[in-house]
Amino acid sequence: MQGTTGRIWSPARGYFVILSLPVLFLLVFFVWPMAGVVLRSFEGGEGIFSQYLTVFERSSYIKVLLYTLQVATTVTVLCLLIAYPVAALVARLQGKWLQIAFALILVPFWTSTVIRTYAWMVLFQRKGVINGMLIDMGLIAEPLRFMHNNIGVHIGMVHIMLPFMLLPLISAFRNIDPSYMRAAGVLGANPIRAFWHVYLPLSMPGVSAGVALVFITSLGFFITPALLGGAHNMMVAVLIEQQVTITVNWELASALASVLLLVTAALYIVYDWVSRRAGGGGVLD
Amino acid sequence: MTWNTSGRLARIFLVVFTVAVLIYLIMPTFVIVPMSFSSKSYLSFPPPGWSLQWYQTMMERHDYPQAFWNSIKIGVPVALLSTTLGTLAALGVVRGRFFGSRPMSAVVIAPLMLPQIILAIGLYPIMAKFGLAGSYPGVVIGHTVICIPLVFITVAASLKNYHPAYEYAAMTLGANWWQTFWHVTFPMIRVGVIVGGILAFTFSFDELIIALFLTSPETRTLPRLLWEDLRQYVTPIIASATTLVLCISFILFGAVALLQRHLSKATRS
């Protein structure tokens, strides 16, 4: 690759060689396993689509897929509603306060999901902190059930996904020039109009990045629904794990995993394409 | 009400709401810390009395220390391997602007975006075929696949911070590939590489799903042991182990925060 070899030298060719090592590693240990899952989903039973027929005919499996979509949607909407005003405020902070707010948002990022879900299990117990506080405040007479139902899964998942919504929103808000809002005000727009016609459209790149990140990640969530969720409403990643470890039905698990893979990959590609067209540069840049 | 007073009310509400949300983000995790010093075997807050007995019990059991060392023995090679491969990938994609570098960057980032459960059930049969299921190399490879994108993102960001003309200049002046990398490129991207390596270690140290499929009772990591214990009973031993993990995570978090501050000062001056 050096000039001494006598060939016409180009940096691009050298970087191609550099790139080949990680790409080879990922081909063997990422692309091959993924392809293996898809191939295995066509095995077992009669006909190559028999696993998929099972997935889409059995109402209990359809219920799991729909529940997964529903939870991912609710979590995404809740994260957006909570994160939008918080990010708008944090983006306007300066100096020390900005650093403190950033640290508080990043700390959960560094804390294991298992540990954060365990924390909720402790808080949610019948005689746990939350029930104790609510009873002391006289809001409820009997302890509430937070675990093994929808409430716990949603509170726990929003808690874990919130930083993923906050960070892209904050970075989008920091790019909005505050003089635009002042200009709208000077030109006679009231704050609501100014927000609706100026601030909101300018914040859309952050909104779409956060929504895509939270929704795609939520679809594959495993730990929180497995520990806080109930047996009646199961998310698809939990079902896949059970099909492998308890039922030992690799083919059906692979079919479920392929459906999840297809949906996630499609959303990822669509999002990348949309954000590229919007001119913001895709996820990959 | 005029716009001014309602604006002020809205601002107060916004501040209160933000503080509440930040508390919601932080508090749950720290409730565990006092519980690990509880004198009783049940979890209540605040604890009825204080003691270190749960730390002692944890140390006396053989599975917790073993799982802790397993997590280190897996996390360090993951950090080294993914730092090497992730840096190479970033160099290739960012500097080598040739046909096909964009689809390749999609392949490099994809492991981070796709659900880990799919990779876990895909890797298990392959590792079993190679006789690596349940071994250290098996889980190290599994974690490295997901950590390459983490390093890739941080290093690619550092590479985009300066113009490749520096490297061309070095090469024009007769430096070979290694000299160019070691004396020009690496000093420029050093912080990105180190931050990527710490992120990779932290990820491996906290990861559950891959470990669930690719470790055995002998090689199981701390998150897997916590997970197995959590499904049985909720005792303060788990709180003690959790507090220990939190300490390590925050030391690493602090290290990265300092590095990034150092970097932003360096680029400003």
Image (spheres, helix red, strand yellow):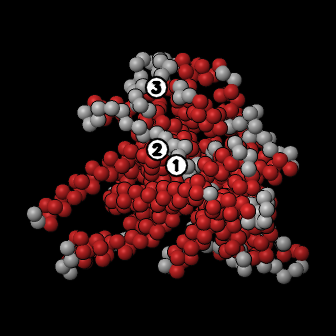
Q: Residue at x 63, y 22 (%)?
A: B59
Is any part of residue B135 visible from this angle?
yes
- Element under disc 3: loop
Q: State the residue position of label 3.
A: B43
> For the residue marked with disc 3, what is the amino acid?
Leu
- Separation (CA) of disc 1 from disc 3: 28 Å
Residue neighbourhood size for the residue with mark 2, other residues' Cα within 10 Å, grouped as few (<14), some (14–19), many (≥20): some
Q: Chain of mark 3?
A: B
Q: Residue at x 41, y 22 (%)?
A: B47
Q: Chain of mark 1?
A: A
| 2 and 1 marks in contact (CB < 8 Å) | yes
| 1 and 3 marks in contact (CB < 8 Å) | no
**Earlier sequence position, callout 2 versus callout 1:** 2
Asked if A126 appears above or below B79 in the picture, the reply is above
- Mark seen at residue A233: 1
Question: Viewer-proximal residue, A271 or A226?
Answer: A226
- Mark seen at residue A89: none
Picture coordinates of residue B58, whole percent (x, y): 61, 23
Question: Viewer-proximal residue, A274 or A61?
Answer: A61
Q: Residue at x 14, y 64 (%)?
A: B4
- Element under disc 1: loop
Asked if A39 appears above or below A200 in the picture, the reply is above
Asked if B71 appears above or below A31 in the picture, the reply is above
Picture coordinates of residue A279, whole percent (x, y): 50, 79
